[in-house]
Image: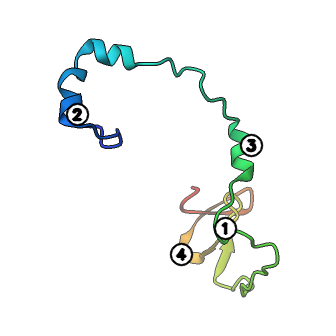
């Protein structure tokens, strides 16, 4: 039998006669329209901790493309020349895109 650990605990005297089907059916209520929540409004008001990055600047050192590298004309990623597969319309294509 499944146990609901979130349910409030009752004394043994209360549980002796309250576990029948009639008691469960009587205690059941219609919860189909009890809460109307707008998910978009909830998402707008939700903030992650430490998510205020408005005044932050990125500090990434960008290196120019080296002589032994090429830019794939399909995925636009820079690869080492060992990843070169073929040329299509005069443009290099990497092994992943070929």
Q: Residue at x 66, y 29 (%)?
A: 36
Q: Secondary structure at mark 1?
A: loop
Q: Are marks 4 and 1 in contact (CB under 8 Å)?
A: no
Task: Kindly state the secondary structure of the residue where label 2 is placed.
Answer: loop
> In the drawing, does residue 20 fall left or right of residue 32?
left
Give the label, 3 or 4, closer to the camera: 3
Residue lying farthest to the top in this orientation: 22
Residue occupying image coordinates x 52% and y 22%: 31
Residue nearer the viewer, 53 or 92: 53
Q: CA distance from mark 2 to mark 3?
A: 36 Å
| Residue 8 placement: quadrant | top left
Using residue 90 as the reference point, say whether residue 48 is left or right of it.
left
N-terminal label among 3 and 4: 3
Residue annotated with mark 4: 82
Please tell me how crowded label 1 is: few (under 14), some (14-19), or many (20+) other residues with Cα within 10 Å: few
Graded by Cα atoms within 10 Å as few (under 14), some (14 to 19) or many (20 or more), the crowding at tag 2 reads few
Instruction: Name the spot of residue 57 as percent of width and height, x first.
Output: 79, 81
Are discs 4 and 2 less than 8 Å apart at CB?
A: no
Image quadrant assignment for residue 47: bottom right
At which x and y percent is residue 44? 74, 50
Mark earlier in primary sequence (1, 2): 2
First reached walking from the N terminus: tag 1 or tag 3 = 3
Please give the residue where the numbered disc 3 appears in the rendered image.
Answer: 41
Q: Earlier in the sequence, mark 4 or mark 1?
A: 1
Whether label 3 touches label 4, CB < 8 Å: no
In this rendering, the answer to whether 92 lies above or below 98 is below
Asked if residue 28 is positioned above or below residue 67 in the image, the reply reads above
Residue 5 position (above or below residue 50): above
Q: Mark 1 = which residue? A: 77
Residue at mark 2? 2
């Amino acid at each position: 039998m499944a146990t609901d650990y979130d349910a409030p605990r009752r004394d043994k005297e209360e549980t002796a006669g309250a576990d029948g089907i009639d008691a469960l059916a009587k205690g059941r209520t219609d919860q189909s329209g009890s809460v109307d929540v707008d998910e978009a409004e909830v998402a707008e008001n939700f903030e992650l901790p430490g998510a205020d990055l408005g005044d932050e600047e990125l500090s990434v050192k960008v290196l120019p493309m080296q002589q032994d590298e090429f830019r794939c004309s399909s995925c636009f990623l820079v690869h080492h020349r060992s990843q070169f597969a073929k040329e299509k319309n005069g443009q290099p294509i990497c092994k992943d895109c070929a």
